Amino acid sequence: MKTKYIVFLVLVLLFSYQNCSRSNFADEGSQQLDNKVEGQSLADLQVQQLKFFTEQNSEMQKGSHKFYVKTKLNYVLDPESGVLAEHDEASGDLKTYCLSQELLVDVRSILSRSSVCRGGPSATEACAQVIQEPYAEVVTSNDVIQLGSASDACGSNKVDLCEDQPSALRGWIDTVRSQLPQLGCGQ
């Protein structure tokens, strides 16, 4: 009986151990992408689409019970035409919006003056091995650049726009989201 208990305890310890040390390897696919676009201007990369994501609480009903589920909204912008498509993953709804000239000029300006940078790991911190999801993606003719993504909670290998441009893009996204009801496309 004592032997079974010790074996069980050893197995629990083995399976519950998390190695918090830094790994010296990276996903080769993302490594190639990051090295290829790092430091390059988005104007040179010829942006074809800008995708961004938000989460919202959606009300669902099953019988007489109402509950809320966190759902993801995906937005795809064509920076040439100014057409913005919204897709709700939970309901499957697809809506189309047209950006105002002011919003379109703003996003084109942000994209034209931005470059892609990668953040390095902090050697003094122990990091949880939790991948950070991107807040936006820039689609070019050759690549998809996931802005804000990182390989751990400390931001190792983080790919984002350089300098203060991430906050400019996030601010623009917030502005667009707040103005969506007024951005209908004229027939």
Image (cartoon, grey):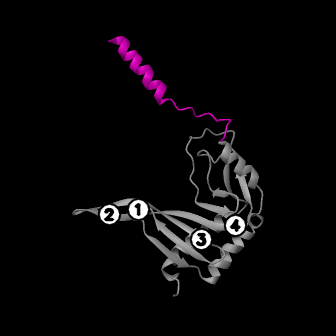
Question: Which residue corresponds to mark 3?
Answer: 77
Residue 47 numbered tag: 4
**Rendered location of residue 75, percent (x, y):** 54, 67
Count residues near mark 4 (Cα–Cα under 10 Å), then give few for <14, some for 14-19, many for 20+: many
Amino acid type at image mark 1: Ala
| Residue 56 belongs to magenta span | no
Amino acid type at image mark 3: Leu
- The answer to which of marks 4 and 2 sits earlier in the sequence is 4
Q: Residue 79, relative to residue 69: is it above or below?
A: below
Q: Residue 180, relative to residue 72: is it above or below?
A: below
Amino acid type at image mark 2: Met
Mark in the foreground, 3 or 2: 3
Residue 98 in sight: yes
- The answer to which of marks 4 and 1 sits earlier in the sequence is 4
Q: Which residues are magenta?
A: 1-26
Q: CA distance from mark 4 to mark 1?
A: 28 Å
- Is 71 displayed left or right of 154 in the figure? left
**Considering the numbered disc 4 on the image, is that residue within a helix, a strand or a loop?**
strand
- The answer to which of marks 3 and 2 sits earlier in the sequence is 2
**47 or 142, nearer to the observer:** 142
Q: CA distance from mark 3 to mark 2?
A: 28 Å
- Is 108 displayed left or right of 74 in the figure? right
Q: CA distance from mark 1 to mark 3?
A: 20 Å
Question: Which residue corresponds to mark 2?
Answer: 60
